[in-house]
Image (cartoon, rainbow, N blue to C red):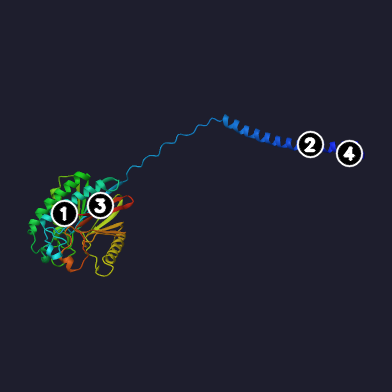
Amino acid sequence: MDLDEFAEEASRSLLRQQNQRLKGDLKAAQSALDDALGRLAVLEGIDRLDPKPPKWPSPRKPGPKQAVIVAMLSDTHFDEIVRAEDVAGVNSYDRTIATRRLQAWTEGLILTAEAGPAFDLQGLIVLWGGDMMTGPIDVMHLQDAADTMFGTLLYWSEQLAAAFTLLADHFGKLHVPVVVGNHGRMEKQKRTHLKARSNLDWHLAHLVARLTADDPRITWSIDEASDAQFEVMGRQHLLTHGDQARGGSGIGGIWPPLMRLTARKQQRQAALGRAFDHLWLGHWHQATFGPQFTVNGSLVGYSAFSAECNFPVEPPQQVAAYVTRDGIVWRTTIVV
């Protein structure tokens, strides 16, 4: 191959290389153009849309749920005397102190409604749980009593009527289920027949009911049985004094007898077609919140009897709870 032929072959080879490179560049350019045209078509399609987004309303602020306050009033032991000297100075009790504590309980309930959880309160239920005063058979507790049995009935019916009227002024509606305790009975031997009618708690409740009879805001259910069943926000509850429970002196304290009593009452009421969700009790002078029961404290507070039996020291207090359609949602004590 001469020099001219070699130069011509080199030129053709260079041209073939350039041609291949240009073809690659053209293919890449065409691919980029196709991508651009595709994106343009999408953008033009979006531009032709006429979107009309829905107007979502702002979420409504939920209003307060409805609730009823259930408050216990039991174990007041009106007109009994507790000497500070008998209880190492931790408590004392007489008519003046009891009157002040009843007033403090009434005011505490009103403050509970004002400062408690945010619910639309539908009214108040006060559970009259028994042992409001002491009958003539309980000589030990009546030593140095402030008044006679009849004087006690007269004075405290007036004080309780004033308290319930004030509560009705604040809550609008007040209902009072009533059971009797064991200290108010008129006979030494416990009886089942006419049990309530032979108990001063029952008579005191009737006196207060008569004094408030002209007030339609206050209603009563004065039971003659040991238990009183009542409804709160569509749920069934049971009130009993609590003296039917036996035991409580062991290391488990009052829990084992109260759990047994609750189970037995649930079984009995279910068999009667009157099943209930929660049991309310007094008697034990120990505010206790169980899963299926609530035990009240006392208004009298720590006494010589409590000290002699080595019972736990507890301030004078009464329990209260918020009850909704879902059940009990909040419990507290009103220390007086």
Q: CA distance from mark 4 to mark 3?
A: 114 Å
Q: Is residue 13 above or below residue 237?
A: above
Identity of the residue furthest to the right in this view: 2
User: In the rendered image, which residue does mark 4 sit on?
Assistant: 6
Within 10 Å of disc 1 (Cα), the crowding (few <14, some 14-19, many 20+) is many
Q: Is residue 186 visible?
A: no
User: In the rendered image, which residue does mark 1 sit on?
Assistant: 101
Q: Is residue 223 above or below residue 172?
A: below
Q: Between 2 and 102, which is closer to the camera in this rendering?
A: 2
Q: Earlier in the sequence, mark 2 or mark 1?
A: 2
Q: Nearer the viewer, mark 4 or mark 2?
A: 4
Q: Is residue 143 left or right of residue 219?
A: left
**Toward which corner of the image does residue 5 lie, by quadrant?**
top right
Q: Amino acid at mark 2?
A: Gln
Q: CA distance from mark 4 to mark 2?
A: 19 Å
Q: Nearer the viewer, mark 3 or mark 1?
A: 1
Q: Amino acid at mark 4?
A: Phe
Asked if labels 1 and 2 touch by Cβ distance under 8 angstroms, the answer is: no
Q: Amino acid at mark 1?
A: Arg
Q: Earlier in the sequence, mark 3 or mark 1?
A: 3
Numbered badge on residue 18:
2
Residue at image coords 24%, 49%: 112
User: In the rendered image, which residue does mark 3 sit on?
Assistant: 70
Within 10 Å of disc 3 (Cα), the crowding (few <14, some 14-19, many 20+) is many
Q: Nearer the viewer, mark 3 or mark 2?
A: 2
Q: CA distance from mark 3 to mark 1?
A: 19 Å
Q: Earlier in the sequence, mark 3 or mark 2?
A: 2
